Amino acid sequence: MPRQEVLRLAGRGYIEVIADYFWLQLVQATGRAVGAEEYRDIYPYADLTTDLDPRFGFVYPFAAGALPTNVGRETWVNTEESTRLLRKGLKQFPNDLKMNVLLAYNLSAFHKQYREAAEVLEQASRLPGAPSYLPALATRLYAQSGSVDAGLALARSLADSAEDPETREIFTQRVRDLEMEGELRRVDSAIADFRGAFGVAPPDIDTLLWLGFLKEPPHDPKGGGFFIGYDERAYSETQQRRLEIYTPDNRGYQWSTDVEK
């Protein structure tokens, strides 16, 4: 691949035409690609094209979306290149909704950087045309990252600023969900301490309280009880599942529209 400096010198006055040429090469490489290595070849074309013409906005999401390749059993490659290209594009187009959402997906699904993914989605949720589910998904990602307080602050802000009763109830419920998740994580921490001391998980919540691993019982505003699941994590009897993103480690990756209430 020629260096952009050489191309700029040789093609002075025709840089956009040269960028268009390498864009066409990128498109052809994408059409020919079959395996991971061939998809990896997309990146140099995309990088060079956007070096030559940084405002060629369509290149960034097109190539970033094409690069990640599943080589089996949910093992993905070419993800670093995809994320690098999105970060490069967002320097030029910080308010591009599609690139922000793609970056949040990469950070969450491929890099497990849930806190940054939540921050990107929180920012993207304020952009014109942003889907209504983005703020709720951001709160879920904050919970996944362990930043329950940040998720609570966002959910409370959204509930307070909601202009209609339906939206207010959605985020009021999310506040309750996050408060519950905070309690469940407190119990999880106690379970981990018990396991560290005895080498096994405790049989129930009462054992954690009796032995002092939990200083006070977990609180459920709905009045339900708590139990330790088969996966040795805490659960509430009144909430069907934990407030988190589902990954290959816990039964399949799910990065959904998060419309459950």
Image (cartoon, rainbow, N blue to C red):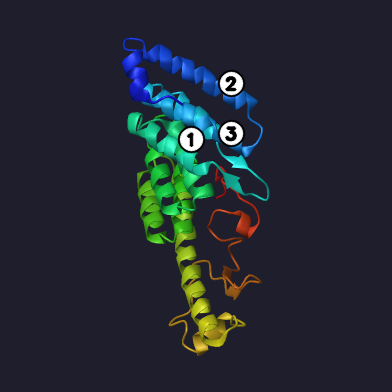
The image quadrant of residue 207 is: bottom right
Question: Of all residues shown, which one is farthest toward the bottom?
Answer: 211
Q: Residue at x 49, y 59 (%)?
A: 177
Q: Which mark is residue 39?
A: 3
User: CA–CA distance between discs 3 and 1?
Assistant: 30 Å
Q: Earlier in the sequence, mark 3 or mark 2?
A: 2
The reply to whether dot 3 and dot 1 touch (C-beta < 8 Å) is: no
| Residue 62 appears in view | yes
- Helix, strand, or loop for circle 3? helix
User: CA–CA distance between discs 3 and 2?
Assistant: 11 Å
Give the x, y percent position of residue 245.
Answer: 55, 53
Q: Amino acid at mark 2?
A: Gln
6 horizontally vs 206: left or right: left
Q: Amino acid at mark 3?
A: Tyr
Give the x, y percent position of residue 139.
Answer: 45, 51
The reply to whether dot 2 and dot 1 touch (C-beta < 8 Å) is: no
Q: Residue at x 56, y 32 (%)?
A: 66
- Helix, strand, or loop for circle 1? loop
Q: Amino acid at mark 1?
A: Pro
Q: Residue at x 40, y 59 (%)?
A: 147
The image quadrant of residue 86 is: top left
| Crowd band around label 2 with a 10 angstrom C-alpha radius: few (<14), some (14–19), many (20+) | few
Name the residue tied to disc 2. Answer: 28
Q: Observer-nearest residue: 28 or 233?
A: 28
Q: Observer-nearest residue: 210 or 20?
A: 20
Name the residue tied to disc 1. Answer: 131
> In front of the other: label 2 or label 1?
2
- Helix, strand, or loop for circle 2? helix
Q: Earlier in the sequence, mark 3 or mark 1?
A: 3
| Crowd band around label 1 with a 10 angstrom C-alpha radius: few (<14), some (14–19), many (20+) | few
